[in-house]
Image (cartoon, coloured by chain):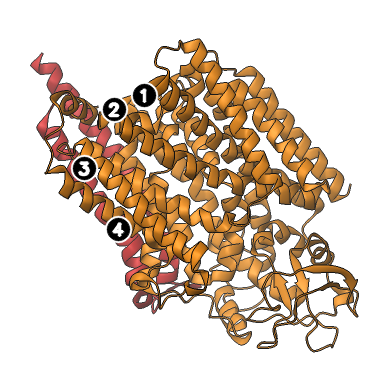
């Protein structure tokens, strides 16, 4: 198994999961009341993160993951191709 | 044409479509039956996953629940979408790489133990039947309200349709019907939402509309809603009432539970490549997010419209939908102050909460109940939260075809989820119990035959749940997610990311999660129901959120136990290495 590949994979996953935690548990729950003092349109910001924003971020995160992993796969495919 | 006839036409033609698809995609091998021959395109799989996932609860109940919970409703919105990030990043690609048929299959192979496999099968069957029971209630409600057939007949019709395409087509048939069902259900959800958004705020996009100002005013919808709900004695709509720790735990339990639900995971086994598994998780979440981001808008509109259209209205002039739902028994009105007007505010209208109708009429012609009015508050209306989405188009006075469409959409949501669940039940019985444990010598043909038989039996049991609904459906849904979070998710996650975990650790962890979570939920939901309040809860965590604690216990037990026993064999090490390499 390629150790570097696995390590880069873990790095990507941990960064993305950190953002996942921040937008949902962070902005949507823990600091939600604090963010409620800011307003975008008719939404209080914390309320928006809890009911809308977090969901949009989730979609975005998966697509960033797909993009990064495809790039990573390609990089290691090329490498193993050269090794052979 | 009236709504009734249109509903027959819409529901009838959607059923004909599902049957047509089922006939054209029959399964000929176990590979077809369990995982659709691994030939499903990621976008199609994304739609199928979305339909599989969005159940009668998502379509019918969720917006209603949020309408009454206000900001607390976000636990369902975040909980039931955030799990897909975990699925995509931590499970789906690796499980697809594993390349077998079922979730217990992975657990049994990775932990080289049939005991681990059996524990997983047990959890899977329990989780799936819990869920199916809820779908069948949804089918019953839609049939009785919109088609005015008997609930039992409605359930039997639903069973026959599912039987037809699940038993005949297996995963292959189910996948392509689910694609069609997704299209029906999302269209049915969006059309009324867009209509109502335009009517109330002038904004055609509901996601923006509920943050917009009301038509012809400068007042934001949510500000008005806060004010009105506050005046009626409810909590302000945009504020939390549950404690932070409870919201945190419920959200986490739902997220990790989602990532551990077998009927969702198995969908990622059906795509051709590992990279397709990632992609289809992304598409699935987009398709799901379309409904989930619309739901909070629908609930805000529904809450506002409901209050506007019944408050201080004379019962005899009450809108038609109010009386229709009263006839079904999901709305009740008790004229506490005898003025003939409907007053709606915070608190229970009736003692014992749920109405027990007798055959008499009250002084204004309303259905009388045996319940005494609850005189501690002035609320006169009992309303079942489940009807909000179904009643919404009528409340907003939308044209009859929209009402018919919603009925077809609700049925699509319920049937697609039921079919997906029945399939994982039948696969785990025929594949994990028979082929891999008790009857290893059967041929592929025989296994396929047993898979069809167990699907048929599972449908029959599900139908019985629909006809004789167990009173505990709402309570056990928390159970399903709690168990998925406390048993299946950790076993899968550690199986991939923690090589040192041996069978002793994994089994001890799963059993610990299973036992602790079950005891906590059974204690508060079934035995000591009178103690089910925050001062008695462990750190203020409700039974709904306890699956998260169960999961942590699973991790701790698994880590500690595994060091007392020897390492997993080399073949398992190689297997995990192989999983990690795309």
Q: Circle 1 sits on which residue?
A: B100
Q: Chain of mark 3?
A: B
Label 1, secondary structure: give it.
loop
The red-tinted chain is A
Label 4, secondary structure: give it.
helix
Vertical order, A45 against B280 (above or below): below
Q: Nearer the viewer, mark 4 or mark 3?
A: 3
Q: Nearer the viewer, mark 4 or mark 2?
A: 2
Of the pair B176 and B540, the residue shown nearer to us: B540
Circle 3 crowding by C-alpha within 10 Å: few under 14, some 14–19, many from 20: many
Q: Are marks 4 and 2 on the same chain?
A: no
Q: Which residue is pictured at 51% across the width and 43% down the height?
A: B53
Task: Measuring from the top left, give residue B17's x and y in whole percent.
Answer: 70, 29
Q: Chain of mark 4?
A: A
Q: Circle 2 sits on which residue?
A: B109
Q: Residue B123 shows which numbered tag? A: none
Q: Residue B505 shows which numbered tag? A: 3
Kindly indicate whether the residue at mark 3 contacts the one at mark 4 (C-beta within 8 angstroms): no
Q: Colour of chain B?
A: orange
Q: Which residue is pictured at 16% across the width and 27% down the height?
A: A76
């Amino acid at each position: 198994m390629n150790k570097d590949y696995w390590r880069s994979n873990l790095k990507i996953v941990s960064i993305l999961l950190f953002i996942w935690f921040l937008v949902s548990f962070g902005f949507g729950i823990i600091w939600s009341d604090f963010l409620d003092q800011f307003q975008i349109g008719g939404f209080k910001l914390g309320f928006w993160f809890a009911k809308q924003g977090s969901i949009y971020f989730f979609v975005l995160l998966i697509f960033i993951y797909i993009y990064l992993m495809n790039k990573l796969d390609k990089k290691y495919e090329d490498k193993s191709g050269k090794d052979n | 044409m009236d709504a009734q006839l249109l509903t027959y036409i819409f529901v009838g033609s959607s059923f004909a479509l599902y049957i047509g698809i089922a006939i054209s995609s029959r399964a000929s091998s176990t590979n077809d039956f369990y995982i659709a021959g691994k030939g499903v395109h990621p976008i199609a799989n994304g739609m199928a996953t979305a339909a599989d996932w969005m159940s009668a609860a998502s379509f019918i109940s969720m917006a209603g629940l949020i309408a009454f919970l206000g900001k607390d409703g976000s636990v369902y919105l975040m909980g039931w979408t955030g799990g897909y990030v975990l699925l995509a990043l931590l499970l789906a690609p690796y499980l697809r790489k594993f390349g077998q048929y079922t979730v217990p299959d992975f657990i049994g192979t990775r932990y080289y133990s049939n005991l681990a496999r059996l524990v997983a099968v047990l959890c899977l069957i329990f989780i799936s039947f819990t869920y199916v029971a809820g779908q069948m209630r949804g089918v019953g409600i839609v049939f009785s309200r919109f088609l005015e057939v008997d609930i039992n007949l409605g359930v039997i019709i639903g069973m026959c349709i599912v039987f037809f395409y699940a038993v005949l087509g297996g995963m292959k048939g189910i996948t392509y019907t689910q694609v069609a069902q997704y299209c029906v259900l999302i269209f049915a959800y969006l059309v009324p939402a867009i209509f109502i958004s335009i009517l109330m705020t002038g904004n055609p996009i509901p996601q923006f509309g509920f943050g917009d100002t009301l038509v012809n005013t400068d007042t934001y919808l949510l500000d008005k809603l806060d004010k009105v709900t506050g005046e009626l004695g409810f909590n302000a709509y945009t504020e939390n009432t549950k404690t932070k720790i409870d919201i945190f735990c419920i959200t986490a339990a739902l997220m990790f539970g989602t990532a551990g639900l077998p009927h969702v995971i198995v969908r990622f086994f059906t795509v051709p490549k590992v990279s397709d598994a990632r992609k289809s998780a992304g598409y699935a979440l987009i398709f799901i997010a379309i409904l989930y981001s619309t739901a909070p808008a629908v609930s805000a509109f529904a809450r506002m419209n409901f209050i506007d259209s019944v408050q201080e209205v004379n019962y005899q002039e009450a809108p038609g939908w109010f009386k229709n739902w009263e006839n079904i028994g999901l709305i009740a009105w008790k004229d506490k102050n005898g003025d003939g007007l409907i007053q709606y505010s915070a608190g229970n209208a009736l003692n014992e909460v749920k109405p027990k109708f007798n055959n008499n009429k009250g002084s204004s012609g309303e259905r009388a109940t045996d319940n005494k009015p609850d005189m501690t508050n002035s609320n006169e209306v009992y309303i079942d939260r489940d009807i909000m989405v179904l009643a919404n188009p009528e409340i907003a006075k939308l044209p009859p075809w929209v009402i018919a469409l919603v009925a077809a959409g609700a049925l699509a949501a319920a049937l697609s989820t039921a079919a997906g669940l029945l399939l994982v039940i039948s696969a785990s019985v025929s594949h994990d119990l028979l082929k891999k444990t008790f009857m290893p010598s059967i041929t592929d043909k025989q296994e396929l035959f047993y898979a069809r038989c167990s699907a048929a039996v599972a449908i029959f049991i599900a139908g019985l749940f629909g006809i004789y609904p167990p009173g505990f459906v709402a309570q056990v849904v928390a159970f399903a997610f709690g168990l998925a979070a406390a048993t299946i998710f950790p076993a899968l996650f550690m199986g991939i990311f923690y090589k040192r975990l041996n069978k002793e650790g994994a089994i001890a962890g799963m059993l610990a999660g299973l036992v602790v979570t079950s005891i906590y939920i059974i204690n508060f939901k079934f035995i000591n129901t009178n103690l089910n309040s925050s001062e008695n809860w462990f750190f203020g965590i409700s039974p709904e959120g306890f699956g998260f604690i169960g999961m942590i216990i699973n991790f701790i037990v698994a880590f500690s136990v595994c060091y007392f026993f020897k390492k997993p064999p080399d073949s398992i090490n190689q297997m995990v290495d192989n999983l990690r390499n795309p």
